[in-house]
Amino acid sequence: MNILLSQKYRIVVVFLSLVFSVLAPSFIAAQSANMDSLADRMAQLERRQSALEAENQQLRMQVTSLMNVVLRKEMTASPIQQIAVQTASATQAAASRPAASNEAPPQKVQFGAEIRFRPETRSGFKNGVDVNTFMYQRIRLDARLRLSDNVTGFIQLQDSRLWGQEASTLSNDANLDLHQSYLQVANFLLPSITLRAGRQELIYGNQRLIGAVGWDNVGRSFDAVKLTFGGSKASADIIAGRLMDRRNSARGDNSQDLIGLYGKIGQANAKIGLEPYLLYLRDGLELAGEKPGVPRESTRIATLGFRHFGAMGSGFSYDLEHAFQFGQRGPDTQRSAALAVQARYRFGGNVKPEFGFEFDYATGDGDATDGRSEEFNNLFPTNHIHYGFADYLGWRNMQDFKPYTSFQLGSKVRTELAYHRFRLVEETGAWKNAGGTVLGLDRTGKLGNDLGHEIDLTFTFPVFEHLRMYPGYSLFIPGKFASGTQGPRSSQFAYWQTVVTF
C-alpha cells in the first residue's frame, strides 16, 4: 500500500514538474512585468510626495511670514486704526449674513465741534480816541446724519458772544442760534440731480458775491433750496434763498431774497475752470430815489458774470472775475460793473516762496441826482479775505492795487505780507467799509480819490492736529480822502485767532 502511494506521489510530482516547466517562463515574465510597472508607479508616487512636501513647507513658511507681518502691524497700529480694522471685519461679517427683506438701512451719526477765540484791538483815525479791544468767542456743535446712501442731514448749533457785553454771566442772554439745518437727497428724481433744503451756508467762487463770511463771529446762512444738476465735469446750481425776513419788523413787509443760477465747467480739482452765473437780488425794503417826488420802491438787481481760473504746471496760476449789474435800486435804474484779476507764482523748495499781484475794481455812483445808481452791489460776500484785513473796503466804488508775497517759516508756519493801494473810482461817491457802512462822502470832490495804504502781515500755523492759530497785524495809513472824512491818524488792527476742532 505504501509502495502504491509513493508511486502515485512520484507521478504527481513528475506531472507538476512538467506543468511548471511549461508555464513557469510565461508566469515569471508576467510577474516580472507587473513588478516593473509597480516599481515605476511607486517611484512616481515618491516624487509626487516629495513635491507636495516641498510645496507644503513653502506654504507654511509664507503663512508664518504673513502672520508675523500682521502681528507687527497690530502691535504698532494706533487705537483708531485698530478700531477701523475691527469695524471693517465686522462690516464684512455682517455683509456675509443674509439681510432681512424688511430691514431698514443702518443709521450713522457723526458729531463735530469747533471752539474759536479771537482777541482783537483796533485804533481809530481820530486823535484822542481810545483803542478798542474785544474778545470774541464762537462755539459750533454739529451732527451729520446718514439715513441711507442717498439721504443725509446736517444740524449745526452756534453760540456767539462778545466777552463783557452781557449784563452778567448769570444772565440769560439769547446767544444760541441754529446756524445750519438741512436735508440733502442725492439722485433726486433723476440720477444727476441733488436736492438740499433748509438753513445752509452758500459759498461760490472766491466768495466775492456769495460767501459764508466766516470771519464774522456769527457768519451767514440762508434759508434756501438748492438743486444741483450735472456730473463731475460740468454742473449747475439753482438756488433760492432768503437771508432776511422783515414781516415781523417795522422796516417793511417784504424780505431779502436771492435767486440764482451758478454753473461750473471743469472738474472739482481741475487746473482750469469756468464759472458763469446769473444772480437775482430782491430786497423788499422800499428805498427813496435820487430824484425828489418819486415814490419809494423795492430793489431788484440782476448780476451777470463769470469767474475763470487756471493753474499751470510750472507754478503759475491766475484768477479772473467780471460782473455786470442791471435792474432797479428802489426807483433808480441800476447799472454797474466790477472786475477782479489775480496772478501768482509759487516756487518749490523748503521755503516755497510765492509772489502775486491782484487788482480789484468796482464802479461807484458819482451823481446823486440823475436817478441812476452806478455803485456796484456786491450782494452777500466775504470781503475780509480780499480787500485788506482791516475791513475798511468792500467791492464797491474802489480800486485796490495789491502786490503780496508769502513763504514758509519752518515746516508748518506760513506767513504773508501784502500791500494795498486804495483809491475811489468816483471822487464824489461814498466810501463804504466791508459791511456796507458809509465811512466818508464828499459831494464836492475836493478831497480827491486817495483813500490810503494798508499793510497786512498774517501767519498761519497748526500747533497740534486739532489746534490752529491765525495771528495778524494790519496798518491803514489814510490818504487825503480818508484823512478829510475820518481823521489823519493811522489805524492799527491786531488779532490772534485760535481755533480748536473736534
Image (spheres, rainbow, N blue to C red):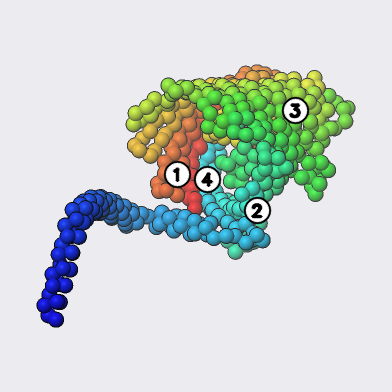
Instruction: Judge by depth and name the residue closer to the eye, 225 or 14.
Output: 14
- Residue at the disc numbered 3: 302
Mark 3 Cα shell of 10 Å, populated few (<14), some (14-19), many (≥20): many
Q: Residue furthest bottom?
A: 1
Q: CA distance from mark 1 to mark 2?
A: 25 Å
In the image, taking residue 192 as reference, residue 352 lies left or right, namely left
- Residue at the disc numbered 1: 469
Please report whichever mark, 3 or 1, sits nearer to the chain's N-terminal start: 3
Quarter placement of the N terminus? bottom left
- Residue at the disc numbered 2: 177
Q: Quadrant of residue 302?
A: top right
In the image, taking residue 260 as reference, residue 477 lies left or right, namely left
Q: CA distance from mark 1 to mark 4?
A: 19 Å
Disc 3 on helix, strand or loop?
Answer: strand
Disc 2 on helix, strand or loop?
Answer: strand
Name the amino acid, label 4.
Thr
Name the amino acid, label 3.
Ala
Tag nearer the camera, 3 or 1: 3
Q: CA distance from mark 3 to mark 1?
A: 39 Å
Instruction: Judge by depth and name the residue closer to the eye, 284 or 29.
Output: 29
Q: CA distance from mark 3 to mark 4?
A: 40 Å
Q: CA distance from mark 2 to mark 3?
A: 31 Å
Name the amino acid, label 1.
Met
Tag nearer the camera, 1 or 4: 1
Please report whichever mark, 2 or 3, sits nearer to the chain's N-terminal start: 2
- Residue at the disc numbered 4: 133
Q: Position of residue 352 (x, y in %)?
A: 38, 29
